[in-house]
Amino acid sequence: MARLRFLWAAALAALLLLPVSRPETPRPAAPGPFGAYVGYGADGVRRVAALGSWLRDEPRVGHTYLPGDVWRNIEGAPDFVRLWARWRRAEPDRLLVLNVPMLEHTEAHVPDAEVRRRLRIGARGSYDVHFRALARRLVAVGAPDTVVVLGWEMNGVTYTHRCEPDPVAWQAYWRRIVTAMRSVPGARFRFDFAPNRGRDAIPWTACYPGDRYVDVLGMDAYDAPRGMPFAEQVTEEYGLRAQVEFARAHGKPVSYPEWGLYENGDDPAYLRGMLDWFARNRPLYQTITDYCPHGVWGCRGNPRSTAVYRSLMRS
């Protein structure tokens, strides 16, 4: 019996000396392909690289906008698109995202009656020539796979290419543009339908032009209105959850061409919420708007949010 007690005690002591295995704390999932809007033209291209140095992680997504003042600029100024195409071609896994206005005088506060008239002209095909010219230019400079964010924030009131004055004409016009650009030999564009988060002037679902003409279901999702926490931004009518559910029902990936701080100031909870949302929903891409008041790199007025962004983007 004494011998048995000795053996038992020895075995117990050996077990106590074994290292204890504890489950590792899971690392947060990465928020997927990312970039930022950091400027137009050559300055924007340079700043993408500088953002990567700051993060110690190179952005794979370049995001810029065509000027919407006159048609010749909506057709894509050659030097402008060539610079961004060169950036895209430098690495095979890069993605170029280009916001394309649907009408000239994009931010000129054109009255509803005139917007309606122009949308109907576009729906008849009178503006197709401008979009074929843009498509040919993008193909020629080596950016035939550009993601085209066409007529963004159409459910709001900011832009001349807004939907609310005539949703039926707006949908028909979108389909004309997509058809015109796809008709150019060599084109492999993806078209991103990107409303504002929430209802705004009209439910964005009322503007949706149909699955054949949309490749990506985007959303511009700033931290607004004042006092609305991130959880409510997810659950509100036509909010983030509605976007993801609509995209799944229609077999489309999601994207976030514009997001960032806004009416709630330096709001690290919003940054955490958005980056977690990206990690869970795996968008095709997400690009923060990085100028004041929205930004976290180019805007020094949001130090707490900046710290959260820099930390979680490195995870």
Image (spheres, rainbow, N blue to C red):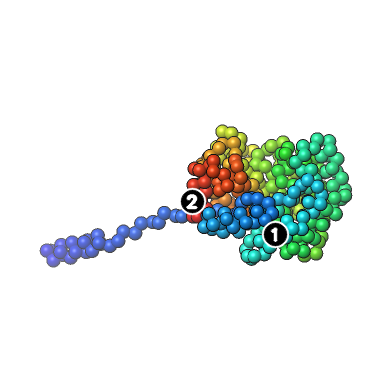
For badge 1, the amino acid type reads: Leu
Instruction: Determine which of the numbered discs, if any, sits on residue 56 in the image.
Output: none
Up-down relation of residue 199 to residue 172 (above or below): above
Given contact means CB atoms under 8 Å apart, are the residues at marks 2 and 1 in contact?
Answer: no
Q: Is residue 228 left or right of residue 12?
A: right
Marks 2 and 1, Cα distance to the nearest angstrom?
A: 31 Å
Q: Please name whichever residue, 41 or 227, is drawn nearer the observer in this view of the structure.
A: 41
Q: Is residue 266 left or right of residue 208?
A: left
Please tell me how crowded label 1 is: few (under 14), some (14-19), or many (20+) other residues with Cα within 10 Å.
Answer: some
Residue highlighted by disc 1: 83
- Picture coordinates of residue 122, whole percent (x, y): 84, 47
Residue highlighted by disc 2: 311
Q: Quadrant of the N terminus?
A: bottom left
- Picture coordinates of residue 40, whole percent (x, y): 68, 51
State the residue at coordinates (49%, 43%). Answer: 304
Q: Earlier in the sequence, mark 2 or mark 1?
A: 1
Q: Is residue 56 left or right of residue 74?
A: left
- Picture coordinates of residue 167, whole percent (x, y): 79, 41
Tally of marks? 2
Q: Give the quarter of the image for residue 34.
A: bottom right
- Residue 131 appears in the figure: yes
- Picture coordinates of residue 266, whole percent (x, y): 53, 39
- Label 1 element class: helix
Q: Please name whichever residue, 236 or 131, is drawn nearer the observer in this view of the structure.
A: 131
State the residue at coordinates (80%, 64%). Answer: 185
Please tell me how crowded label 2 is: few (under 14), some (14-19), or many (20+) other residues with Cα within 10 Å.
Answer: few
State the residue at coordinates (65%, 53%). Answer: 44
- Residue 149 appears in the figure: no
Q: Give the quarter of the image for residue 140.
A: bottom right
